[in-house]
């Protein structure tokens, strides 16, 4: 019993060292490469073949197909890469990850004596570890420090493999263990074992390494190794699928590609192979004893054969993932909007600017709705609505990237003064709309904090926020109208509205301090209350920026100091009139009036 526990602990120790070494080595490689790997991933994917080769090389470098695919999921989620481009890289990563098995085979090369002993894995690992720690601790250049981390990771990885092999070695004489391994020759059991083990370890390389360690017992035959190898590929999809949680639909489709590649390949080749095996009455090589090197050959050969089979069907795989993860009407609408930013219009600036106006108007509409949704959460929190606010904010980031990149191409052309003014307006307002989206998410996170910590504002604070939120709704509506319709009646009203909101937030901060002193509210309530006011001030400021840009465009003023000049020019008698009107409309209730208000008073309007 004690010997069994010791063996299990030794095996788990080897697995832990292996996984840690692989992580350290992979991180060191990524740090040494900087952002070059990421740049290559989304730049050099013009054809499926290039994508497969690129995915294979990058994965061979960072030693993890899951890490490569997780990066690609991120690129697709952000809109930098299309699903079709990602499929090739994912396929290539399946081949690239098999290089680890060849590296691990080195740990089984041992010399007996003399010069051969110097070439043993233990000696090489020791030398690499010593050089690595010297590089990390005593050298100052970042590149050499990263190289040191790579070397240390490699040494730890090899030590882990040796530890696993040492734990497995005594089992070669155990009839029970040999009998257990023989049961894995059943294709269904073998595939299931491969899937489960790899899903738990979240690493195909680790599973292959354990299989290689088991092979030193002499109990692993080809019939046992093949189904486990097939299952390993499917189980490796677990971390990729987990990484797609919270991504958009294209991100989820990319993660699904990883699973489908191995799942389809496993189904196709298991049917072909085992059907052929049954027809011929059993292949002669099924009983061959597998060694670590033979397992590396099997792993690489199976993966290469699998991708060679599936690569001609990339378009069909793309259609399948789109069928499995369907677009909603809203998703289809977004795709149509981004399609408006067509490169063919770049030769005709007026057309390109008109297309940009249509897309940025849609962005403005989504921004407006998101701010209103976030404020509604302050009154009645709902987790699904919170997630929608966050998802919309991520979409607004995508709008900024797409429109910004398109506008840079537009402005590269010769533009008239009027066209230049329009382009400047869009570029100025684009970042402001994106920042408004950030502050809508900021309000949503405050609402989430209040819910999770079970904090509620005092009746006084809720009454005051009712007035503030009504003013926010009005300034956002004015901004939306002024931008989307070039409304020169609405635009000049935004700046005086901003000043009212700034003054209101200042007064609310003062009142909160008074309530703190009187013990009517706590510091725990104060932090989220102050966060609401900060987001409100910033929303008002960005609304003012957009309105000023509208006025500038009308006046065809595009100099860098136009913002300050335009504000000063708007401070007319009409400005004072509008300011006074808003000041009267949004006058805060007095402290005495607040004390008389019922606590149950409805404060937040539920509107989309």
Image (cartoon, rainbow, N blue to C red):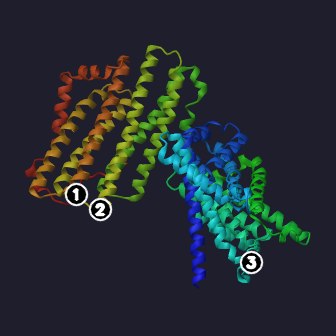
564 vs 335: above or below: above
Is 508 situated left or right of 310 in this image? left
Is 520 situated left or right of 28 in this image? left
Residue 219 placed where, x, y %?
A: 76, 74
User: Which of the two discs, 3 and 2, sits closer to the camera?
Assistant: 3
Residues at marks 3 and 2, CA–CA distance in whole angstroms: 53 Å
Q: Which residue is mark 2?
A: 453
Residue 524 circle label? 1
Q: Looking at the image, which is closer to me, 41 or 501?
A: 41
Residue at 59% x, 85% y: name it: 1
Q: In this orientation, does residue 444 appear?
A: yes
Q: Earlier in the sequence, mark 3 or mark 1?
A: 3
- Disc 1, disc 2: CB below 8 Å? yes
Q: Earlier in the sequence, mark 3 or mark 2?
A: 3
Q: Looking at the image, which is closer to me, 232 or 117?
A: 117
- Disc 3, disc 2: CB below 8 Å? no
Residue 544 placement: quadrant: top left
User: Which of the two discs, 3 and 1, sits closer to the camera?
Assistant: 3
Q: Which residue is mark 3?
A: 183
Residue 257 placed where, x, y %?
A: 65, 53
């Amino acid at each position: 019993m004690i010997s069994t526990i010791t063996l299990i602990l030794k095996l788990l120790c080897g697995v832990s060292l292996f996984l840690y070494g692989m992580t350290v080595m992979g991180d060191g490689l990524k740090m040494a490469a900087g952002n070059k790997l990421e740049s290559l991933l989304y730049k050099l994917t013009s054809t499926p073949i290039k994508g497969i080769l690129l995915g294979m090389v990058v994965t061979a470098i960072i030693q993890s197909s899951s890490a490569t695919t997780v990066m690609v999921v991120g690129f697709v989620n952000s809109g930098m890469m299309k699903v079709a481009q990602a499929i090739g890289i994912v396929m290539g990563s399946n081949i690239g990850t098999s290089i680890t098995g060849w590296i691990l085979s080195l740990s089984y090369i041992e010399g007996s004596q003399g010069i051969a002993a110097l070439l043993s894995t233990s000696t090489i690992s020791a030398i690499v570890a010593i050089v690595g720690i010297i590089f990390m601790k005593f050298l100052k250049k970042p590149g050499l420090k990263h190289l040191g981390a790579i070397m240390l990771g490699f040494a730890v990885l090899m030590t882990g493999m040796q530890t696993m092999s040492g734990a497995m070695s005594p089992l070669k004489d155990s009839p029970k263990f040999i009998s257990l391994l023989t049961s894995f020759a059943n294709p269904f059991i073998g595939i299931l074992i491969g899937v489960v083990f790899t899903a738990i370890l979240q690493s195909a390389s680790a599973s292959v390494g354990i299989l290689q360690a088991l092979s030193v017992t002499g109990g692993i035959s080809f019939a046992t190794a093949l189904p486990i190898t097939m299952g390993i590929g499917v189980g490796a999809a677990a971390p990729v699928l987990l990484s797609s949680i919270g991504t958009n639909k294209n991100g989820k489709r990319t993660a699904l590609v990883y699973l489908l590649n191995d799942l389809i390949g496993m189904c196709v080749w298991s049917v072909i192979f085992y059907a052929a095996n049954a027809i011929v009455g059993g292949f002669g090589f099924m009983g061959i004893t597998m060694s670590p090197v033979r397992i590396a050959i099997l792993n690489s050969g199976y993966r290469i054969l699998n991708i060679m089979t599936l690569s001609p069907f990339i378009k069909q795989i793309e259609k399948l993932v789109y069928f499995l993860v369907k677009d909603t009407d809203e998703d289809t609408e977004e795709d149509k909007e981004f399609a408006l930013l067509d490169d063919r219009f770049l030769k005709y600036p007026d057309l390109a600017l008109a297309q940009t106006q249509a897309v940025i108007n849609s962005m403005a509409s989504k921004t407006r709705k998101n701010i209103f949704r976030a404020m509604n959460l302050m009154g009645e929190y709902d987790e699904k609505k919170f997630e929608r606010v966050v998802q919309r904010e991520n979409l607004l980031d995508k709008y900024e990237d797409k429109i910004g990149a398109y506008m840079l191409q537009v402005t590269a052309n010769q533009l008239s003064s009027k066209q230049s003014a329009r382009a400047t307006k869009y570029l100025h307002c684009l970042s402001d709309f994106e920042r408004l989206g950030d502050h809508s998410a900021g309000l949503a996170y405050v609402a989430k904090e209040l819910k999770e910590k079970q904090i509620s504002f005092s009746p006084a604070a809720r009454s005051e926020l009712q007035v503030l939120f009504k003013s926010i709704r009005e300034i956002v509506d004015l901004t939306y109208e002024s931008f989307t319709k070039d409304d020169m009646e609405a635009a000049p009203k935004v700046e005086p509205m901003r000043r009212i909101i700034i003054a209101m937030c200042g007064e609310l901060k003062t009142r909160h301090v008074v309530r703190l002193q009187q013990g009517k509210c706590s510091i725990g309530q104060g932090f989220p209350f102050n966060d609401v006011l900060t987001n409100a001030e910033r929303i008002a400021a960005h609304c003012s920026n957009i309105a000023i840009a509208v006025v500038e465009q009308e006046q065809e003023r595009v100099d860098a100091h136009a913002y300050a000049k335009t504000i000063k020019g708007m401070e007319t008698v009409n400005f004072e009139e509008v300011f006074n009107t808003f000041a009267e409309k949004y006058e805060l209730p007095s402290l005495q009036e607040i004390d008389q208000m019922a606590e149950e008073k409805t404060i937040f309007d539920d509107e989309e």
